[in-house]
Amino acid sequence: MTSIRSNLQQVNARIAAACARAGRAADSVQLLAVSKTMPLSSVQEALACGQTAFGENYVQEGVQKIEALRAWEAESGAASAARWHLIGPLQSNKTRVVAAHFDWVHSVDRLKIAERLAEQRPAELAPLQVCIQVNIDGGASKSGVAPGEVLALARALAALPRLTLRGLMTIPEPASGFAAQRAVHAQARALFEQVRDAGVGPRFDTLSMGMTADLEAAIDAGSTLVRVGTAIFGAR
Ligand SMILES: *Cc1c(COP(=O)(O)O)cnc(C)c1O
């Protein structure tokens, strides 16, 4: 068995165990395989194991992989169910290429970016699925919207065409220990419910939080999508 195959099995088992412990259905958490810095062959290997959702941080690297996979599929007659999520920072001069290639963007943090994505999403593609990145703990990275600004941005995004507002994404500062990790994730969960209950659209159903080191705490706090790189593809 390849290591990617056995790693995927282990990560899926971690997700299932965390769901069971939290009293949640096993299919209530989606696994996003974060393939940044990994070669296309690793993505193809994970695809062959049934993993379909892939996350990339860097626009250019992601677009290259998306195009290379399509070219390989066209040549080999294979049609994969790969879905591509941008999880890294997005500058306004890159929105057009992102709107044309990705299925999801988790890292929307200002209206201008969302307006450009809406305008540039090709009409023949399904609406782009977007999450608002929240700086939930005021962390040093400073990426993401302050919690108090999320609802206003969500309302503005929900009104845009060609986008579907799906939820929130967080990248908290690393914390050690389940309780400390869970406490931050619980703040994100509370904010998620507050925005959802304010009525920002019927598909606001995604709370993207939890990575290799803290996916159990994230699931316990209500994550619906964990973004896992290292535990699947190895150290970068
Ligand atoms: C790299 C990255 C991940 C995956 O991190 P691991 O610790 O390797 O699981 C998840 N989310 C974001 C935004 C990342 O940049």
Image (cartoon, rainbow, N blue to C red):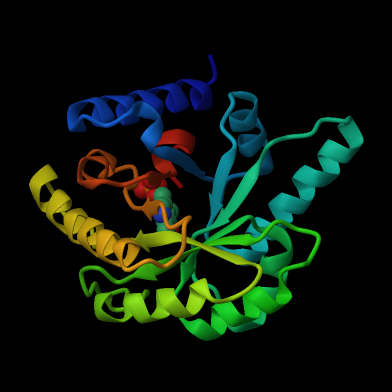
Q: Image point 72% across, 51% down: which residue?
A: 66
Q: Image point 41% across, 52% down: which residue?
A: 205
Q: Is residue 143 left or right of residue 44?
A: left
Q: Image point 40% across, 45% down: which residue?
A: 225
Image spot of residue 72 (x, y percent): 83, 39
Q: Is residue 168 visible?
A: yes
Q: How many marks?
A: 0
On screen, 183 above or below 73?
A: below
Q: Residue furthest top?
A: 1
Image spot of residue 195 (x, y percent): 31, 67
The one nearer the camera, 95 or 118, is 118
Location of residue 105 by image quarter: bottom right
On screen, 8 above or below 116?
A: above
Location of residue 187 by image quarter: bottom left
Q: Residue furthest left?
A: 179
The one nearer the camera, 156 or 107, is 156
Q: Is residue 78 left or right of residue 170?
A: right
On screen, 220 above or below 169?
A: above
Image spot of residue 93 (x, y percent): 65, 82
Image spot of residue 150 (x, y percent): 34, 75
Q: Is residue 115 left or right of residue 204?
A: right
Location of residue 132 by image quarter: bottom left
On screen, 149 above or below 188?
A: below
Q: Residue furthest bottom?
A: 112
Q: Is residue 36 visible?
A: no
The one nearer the camera, 51 or 21, is 21
Q: Is residue 2 left or right of residue 119?
A: left
